[in-house]
Image (tube, rainbow, N blue to C red):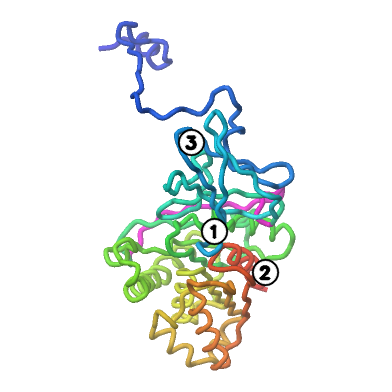
Amino acid sequence: MINKSALALLITGLLLPPASTVHAVSLPADFPPLPPSDRAVKEYVTAVNADNSVTFRLFAPLAKEVKLFTGATPESFVSHPMNKDAAGIWTFRSKVLAPNLYEYFFNVDGFRSIDSGSANTKPQRQVNTSQILVPGSLLDVRAVPHGELRILTYHSAELGSERQLAVWTPPGVDAAAKALPVLYFYHGFGDSGRSAIDQGRIPQIMDNLLAEGKIKPMLVVIPDTETDTASTTPENVVPQDRRKVFYPANARAADRELIHDIIPLISQRFNTRTDAAGRALAGLSQGGYQALVSGLSHLDHFGALATFSGVTITTVPNAAVSAQLDKPQEINRQLSNFTVVVGETDSVTGKDIAGLKQTLEQKGIKFDYHAYPQLGHEMDVWRPAYAEFVQKLFR
């Protein structure tokens, strides 16, 4: 049995093993080179310059060719050749960029790579893209009163699994006596539950708009759009069957979870309004389809609805949505705002939104429509669309 003195020495790290038991560690002969220790870290990682240009850097001394790719969609990707210095650091300096959150990745001898010198990656189920924030926009962390981002772990009875969601709460929510309205927001296909937070920048947008007096205090609830049941795991569905198999099954499961698990959970954990006018529902891409399905299937639960570049019943039929669209007077009476947004060059859901727009117009359903010029299926559509939508809520 070890005595108390020896135990104390062990705990404080003063009791060291005998020198004879310490062995030098030798690295394998093919171990890749380490970044140069005689250079400051900022000299070999990507950084924003004083003039809002960006110097992209990648330490890859053994690579024969490295290219930088910028852009958010395959149609907008631009390739930039990078130059390597004597220490093996590849660089490319951009032009001066407007304030925004930009996506990029590297092609290293044919291999698509994130920026290994940055922790800021796009939140995806299969991570392959990095991000960098050029300051000066609504996306910044500013010196304003900050809300909180709370992660709730809960049991979904509908899905039979343990789940997580995020909730943005305004400053002082715990002391607020007045019940708050709630916006439920769904992220897009292929992204993780942090997409709306880290890339959509919902916490920063809400903090800044609230500080400017442009929005009312509210909760923003961000569920995981993917239900990940045995029949709704997207990796198990081949891409050509996604709209026929995955979207309908996942939408049904997520709808049950929202109505029977999530909304009751939020009502239990926070002081929230329980009337339909105190709830809104929105989403982008796949999440836009989810918002459309749940919003119109349970019209009596919500007072506002938005789909940003969403899949629609134009390509993924839903009987409940179709039935509700045949009751335009009910929709017009119930929804204070119905927003439909798309990028003009969207090759992913442009057909979906065009079909929905035509249907709404034919049936006389009131809606706000915005097509963003020269943009496709990307966050440069969805972030400003979100910021505009929340300013219309709960007035």
Taking the image as shown, residue 224 lies to the left or right of residue 44, namely left
Say which residue appears at 32% left-offset and 59% top-offset: 161
Q: Nearest to the eye among marks 3 and 2: give it.
A: 3
Q: Give me the C-alpha separation between circle 3 and circle 1.
A: 22 Å
Q: Which residue is mark 1?
A: 77
**Frontmost residue, 173 versus 237:** 237
Residue 140 horizontal/vertical position (percent): 67, 51
- The three-letter code of the residue at mark 1 reads Phe
Residue 305 horizontal/vertical position (percent): 55, 76
- Label 3 or label 2, whichever comes before in sequence order: 3
The magenta stretch is 138-157
- Label 1 or label 2, whichever comes before in sequence order: 1
Quadrant housing the C terminus: bottom right
Say what secondary structure mark 3 lies in.
Answer: loop
- The three-letter code of the residue at mark 3 reads Ala
Q: Is residue 264 visible?
A: yes
Q: Which mark is residue 165?
A: none
Taking the image as shown, residue 121 lies to the left or right of residue 94, namely left
Q: Is residue 175 visible?
A: no
Residue 382 horizontal/vertical position (percent): 58, 66
Q: Residue furthest left?
A: 1
Q: Which mark is residue 391?
A: 2
- Label 3 or label 1, whichever comes before in sequence order: 3
Q: Which mark is residue 60?
A: 3
Say which residue appears at 61% left-offset and 81% top-offset: 336
Q: Give me the C-alpha separation between circle 1 and circle 2.
A: 32 Å
**298, above or below 264, in the image:** below
**Frontmost residue, 158 versus 359:** 359
